[in-house]
Amino acid sequence: VQLQASGGGLVQTGGSLRLSCAASERFHRIDHMGWYRRAPGLQREMVATLTSTGSTNYADSVKGRFTISADSARETMYLQMNYLKPEDTAVYYCNIIGVQSVTAGTRSIWGRGTQVTVSS
């Protein structure tokens, strides 16, 4: 299975973007979904996560501005980003931890990433 992230781009400070991450195949079970980012010269950091129970967690830097969600079938996950700041500039990656079939083990799968650039 592959994850395809999209929706990145160039936006001015205060603007909004909506990232999407679609899986090429359905999962038998998804345990955890998340968005992460890597800014130039920095390590990858967690942005937002969503568990199978619907619990969400956000980095302090994005609380109140970003919202993670998924469609009812959990085949596509989203990251709504509002009030963007230059420090949000990074490559954003999606991640799913789950099981593809009843006989398969748990896997952590990453998307290729989508660039978000916020101009000042």
Image: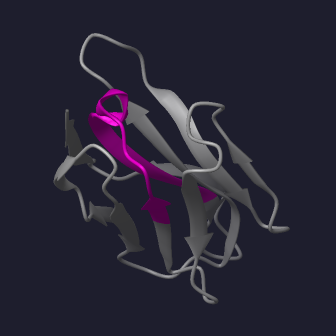
**Residue 43 vertical position relative to residue 63 in the rendered view, above or below:** above
Residue found at x 19% / y 51%? 11
Q: What is the basis of the colouring in this image? A: one colour
Q: Residue furthest bottom?
A: 72
Residue closest to the eye, 92 or 74: 92
Tell me if residue 40 can be seen. yes
Residue found at x 58% / y 62%? 68
Name which quarter of the figure residue 73 lies in: bottom right
Q: Residue furthest top?
A: 41
Q: Which residues are magenta?
A: 79-97
Residue found at x 50% / y 70%? 77
Q: How many marks?
A: 0
Magenta highlight on residue 81: yes
Left or right of 91: which side holds 100?
right
- Place of residue 69 in the rendered image (x, y in percent of width and height, measured from the top left): 60, 70
Residue found at x 66% / y 31%? 60
Tell me if residue 100 can be seen. no
Residue closest to the eye, 32 or 61: 61
Magenta highlight on residue 94: yes
- Place of residue 51 in the rendered image (x, y in percent of width and height, measured from the top left): 75, 59
Name which quarter of the figure residue 52 lies in: bottom right
Residue closest to the eye, 109 or 81: 81
- Place of residue 101 in the rendered image (x, y in percent of width and height, measured from the top left): 62, 76
Viewport quadrant of the C terminus? top left
- Place of residue 9 in the rendered image (x, y in percent of width and height, measured from the top left): 16, 54
**Residue 19 vertical position relative to residue 56 in the rendered view, above or below:** below
Viewport quadrant of the N terminus? bottom left
